[in-house]
């Protein structure tokens, strides 16, 4: 500990004054958190726009979409997209959403802003690294966007970039010449940014906790960000070499992922001896933990917010943290469940199926603890708490379809159908985004100093909540009926009767997407016109509510906080007649 | 709220919860980086094993002389550089500055010798017709692909390490950096050594012609 004093002295920086140092290349974790949030916000609207285009095409394949031919004259001549361009848009939708939204928003954005404050630190352990991770991620985003503007468009191989399609050149289809190379480079850069971020998060959590902030007293979302950063540290370390090998296959003539004798466009490919399955192993060894990188921070955020509005302590706080760790640990043993039909040895499918079903145990315990925490509570229904309840709902809905998909015999039938699309959108995408929405409504006052509009927030919740069920629930039936995903139009006899369902989903998607503009409006309007927020508007206990709104440059205005209680002291009687005790209050919480 | 907060002028450390590992942040982060980097090497070596098992016509081109002899010399040089790094670290801890700089210098020189021997070996192999995508023996091209990419990744680490050591030496000499930085860089250098102890048997000894 004596050595640490020297390294901490280096953090006693003063607030910068120039615009560039303050808002662009800022070392302040709060600014970097907002930058991540802004990037995720930009990305999510691009990703949503892409899903609109895809849904429009699926509902009405012959309709020309205005201005689409301007984006790509080859991909959408006269506004009607080609099947290949549909795949390009799908690839970009998945990539943008998974990497730049679901990884950035709940983890990098909120984590950067609130992890140091919640543990009572002035900044992250390495502010300079922190700035570098954001700008590295931003560069990855620019490289990815560049794929839209190259001649043959973005790649068509999906966000999973399955080899050999992703590893061979333009002979295999549009987007596989430059677009796919840009994709691989972008993801490699993204890995570096995420690794830097993960190192920083772990060091900050372990080394910069203020006096009294023992690990047991850490708020649950700090725990979630900590566990997530451990997962990210190990997962992105595998995706990085995989992307390097992919780039070598594409540019240096190697054949890591390309089998011998591959003939594409009537041309024998100059590659031999590689294994497409190797890419799947490396990718999914990253890819499955990535699912938890997306969902764990949102679980943490919900565990943090729900007790505030239930005015009751979270049930089983230690079990909650234990479940998060168990989920993180198990996430490394199950990657093969994405590959049941890939041609692996069928025995290994059983080996991957069992731990997959095991994961449902901590996930179910978490869900039950959350439900138990609201049982009998006098809920305060705010936008934030509604999104927390919505999170539980979609997490259950998406989780239950996971029971089916985890079993190889059922998965063989359902693989690559809309059932899978419904499953991962519910459990990973929508659930994670609900956590982000809850976090936004909850923390916006602290981040900006102004409250968001509750009426608009509730309208946004109900439209989104009903909307996502209208979009994704019917997809289960489509999948059970054998409707394969990644088709740009449905011309087979058995699919034609399903087209009305697709039209319904398209209309629901357009409306739900439109509802997100209410959120955007609320965000921008409240930023400037919202009512001024007090220091602790929600009557919450954790450290971010013990400081000014918005927090000063060094978070606590030169004071060092001392923590006396856990984050869970709700529904108690405090000395000053409130029903909660702040973490910084020296008052001893009654033994419950 | 004022009663709940205290102001400490005595420095920040007294206001912090003791770290569970009692490591300073830089050292902790280096250990975390090493874990992460070990997984990167683990993944790429897994790829090598995977491809090798799946390739029936794998080429094993190395002979005891000159390839393995050269590899043994490289191994010896790199392991010696770990010893000199240890000496530099010990000297820095005791505050013997000039001794530390000497040992850092020796480490850099040994690192450069390793890199030179490595690049010389590569250029001989390029002359024989090996590359990432060619095999002069007519067997599978995967030997060249895995050999050059894995040893290349390792060599990149060695070269980054050499640059880091030079920067650290200059910084330590001008009192901009302290003994902690020497130790942390040493951790990285030993790790790069350790990786070579996996690379050498897997990529050299296992590819000796029978």
Image (cartoon, coloured by chain):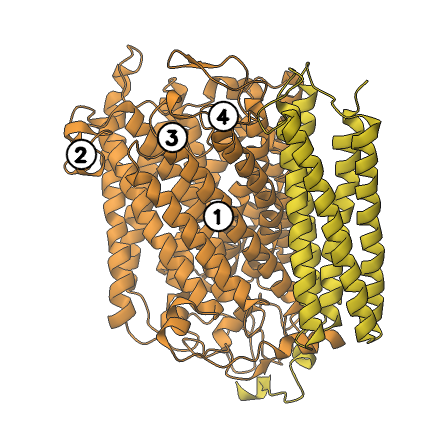
Between disc 1 and disc 2, whose residue precedes? 2
Locate residue A556, reporting x and y percent.
51, 80
Measuring from the top left, give residue B166's x and y in whole percent: 68, 63
Q: Is residue B88 left or right of residue A526?
A: right
Name the subunit of mark 3.
A
Residue A397 appears in the picture as rendered: no
User: Is A274 drawn above or below residue B9 in the view shown?
Assistant: above
Instruction: Indicate the quadrant where residue A129 lies.
Output: bottom right
Indicate the secondary structure of the residue bearing disc 4: loop
Q: Nearer the viewer, mark 3 or mark 2?
A: 3
**Residue at the disc numbered 2:** A69
Disc 1 chain ID: A
Task: Give the mark nearer the N terminus: 4 vs 1.
Answer: 4
First in residue order: circle 3 vs circle 2: 2
Residue B162 visible (yes or no): yes
**Mark 3, residues whose alpha carbon is within 10 Å: few (<14), some, or many (≥20)?**
many
Q: Quadrant of residue A424?
A: top left
Question: Where does label 1 land, which residue?
Answer: A190
Q: Chain letter for orange?
A: A
Q: Which element is circle 2 on?
A: helix
Instruction: Identify the residue at horizontal 56%, vertical 18% (top origin).
Output: A272
* Dot 3: element: loop
* Quadrant the N terminus of chain A occupies: bottom right
- Disc 3 and disc 1 on one polypeptide chain: yes
The colour one sees for chain B in the rendered image is: yellow
């Amino acid at each position: 500990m004596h050595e640490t004093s020297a390294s901490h002295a280096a953090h006693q920086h003063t607030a910068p004054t120039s615009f560039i140092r303050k808002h662009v290349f800022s070392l302040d974790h709060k600014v970097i958190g907002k930058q991540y949030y802004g990037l995720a916000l930009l990305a999510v609207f691009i990703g949503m726009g892409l899903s609109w285009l895809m849904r429009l095409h699926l509902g009405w394949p012959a309709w020309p979409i205005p201005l689409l031919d301007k984006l790509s004259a080859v991909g959408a001549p006269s506004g009607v997209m080609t099947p290949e361009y549909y795949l390009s848009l799908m690839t970009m939708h998945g990539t943008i959403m998974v990497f730049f939204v679901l990884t950035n928003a709940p983890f990098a954005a909120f984590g950067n802003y609130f992890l140091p404050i919640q543990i009572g630190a002035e900044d992250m352990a390495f502010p300079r690294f922190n700035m570098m991770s954001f700008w590295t991620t931003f560069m990855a985003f620019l490289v990815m966007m560049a794929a839209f503007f190259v001649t043959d468009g973005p790649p068509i191989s999906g966000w999973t970039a399955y080899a050999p399609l992703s590893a061979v050149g333009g002979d295999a289809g549009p987007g596989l010449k430059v677009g796919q190379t840009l994709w691989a480079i972008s993801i490699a850069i993204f890995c570096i940014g995420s690794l830097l971020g993960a190192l920083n998060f772990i060091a900050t959590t372990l080394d910069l906790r203020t006096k009294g902030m023992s690990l047991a007293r850490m708020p649950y979302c700090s725990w979630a960000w900590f566990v997530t950063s451990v997962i990210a540290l190990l997962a992105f370390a595998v995706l990085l070499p995989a992307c390097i090998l992919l780039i070598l296959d594409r540019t240096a003539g190697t054949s890591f992922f390309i089998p011998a004798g591959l003939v594409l466009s009537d041309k024998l490919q100059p590659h031999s001896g590689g294994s497409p399955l190797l890419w799947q192993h490396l990718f999914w060894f990253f890819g499955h933990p990535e699912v938890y990188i997306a969902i764990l921070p949102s679980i943490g955020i919900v565990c943090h917010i729900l007790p505030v509005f239930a005015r009751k302590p979270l049930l089983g706080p230690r079990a909650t943290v234990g479940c998060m760790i168990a989920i993180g640990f198990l996430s490394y043993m199950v990657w093969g469940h994405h590959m049941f039909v890939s041609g692996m040895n069928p025995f290994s499918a059983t080996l991957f199926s069992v731990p997959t079903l095991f994961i449902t145990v901590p996930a179910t315990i978490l869900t039950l603890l959350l439900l138990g925490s609201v049982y009998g509570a006098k809920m305060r229904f705010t936008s934030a708490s509604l999104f927390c309840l919505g999170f539980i709902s979609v997490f259950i809905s998406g989780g239950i379809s996971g029971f089916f998909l985890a079993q190889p015999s059922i998965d063989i039938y359902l693989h690559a159908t809309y059932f899978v699309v419904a499953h991962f959108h519910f459990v990973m995408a929508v659930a994670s985004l609900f956590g982000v929405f809850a976090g936004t409504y909850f923390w916006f006052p602290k981040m900006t100093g102004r409250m968001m509009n509750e009426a608009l927030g509730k309208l946004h919740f109900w439209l989104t909540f009903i909307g996502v069920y209208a979009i994704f629930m019917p997809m289960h039936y489509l999948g059970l009926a054998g409707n394969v995903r990644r088709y740009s139009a449905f011309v087979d006899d058995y699919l034609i009767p399903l087209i009305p369902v697709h039209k319904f989903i398209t209309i629901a998607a357009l409306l739900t997407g439109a509802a997100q503009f209410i959120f955007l409006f609320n965000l921008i309007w409240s930023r400037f016109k919202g009512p001024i927020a007090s220091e602790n508007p929600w009557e919450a206990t954790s450290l971010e509510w013990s400081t000014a709104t918005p927090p000063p440059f060094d978070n606590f205005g030169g004071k060092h906080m001392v923590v006396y209680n856990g984050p869970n002291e709700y529904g108690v009687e405090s000395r000053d007649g409130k029903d909660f005790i702040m973490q910084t209050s020296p008052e001893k919480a009654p033994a419950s | 709220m004022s009663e709940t907060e205290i102001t400490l002028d005595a420095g920040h450390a007294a206001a912090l919860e003791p770290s569970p590992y009692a490591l300073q942040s830089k050292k902790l982060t280096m250990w975390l980086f090493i874990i992460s980097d070990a997984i990167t090497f683990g993944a790429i070596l897994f790829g090598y094993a995977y491809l090798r098992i799946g390739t029936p016509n794998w080429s094993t081109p190395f002979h005891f002389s000159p390839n393995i002899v050269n590899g043994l010399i490289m191994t010896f040089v790199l392991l010696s550089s770990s010893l000199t790094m240890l000496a530099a670290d010990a000297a820095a801890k005791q505050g013997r500055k000039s001794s530390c700089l000497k040992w850092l210098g020796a480490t850099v020189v040994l690192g450069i010798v390793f890199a030179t021997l490595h690049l010389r070996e590569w250029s001989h192999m390029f002359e024989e017709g090996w590359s990432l995508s060619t095999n002069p023996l007519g067997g599978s091209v995967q030997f060249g692909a895995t050999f050059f990419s894995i040893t290349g990744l390792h060599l990149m680490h060695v070269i980054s390490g050499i640059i880091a050591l030079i920067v650290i030496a200059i910084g330590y000499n001008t009192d901009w950096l302290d003994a902690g930085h020497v130790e942390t860089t040493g951790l990285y250098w030993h790790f790069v050594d350790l990786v070579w102890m996996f690379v050498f048997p897997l990529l050299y000894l296992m590819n000796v012609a029978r």
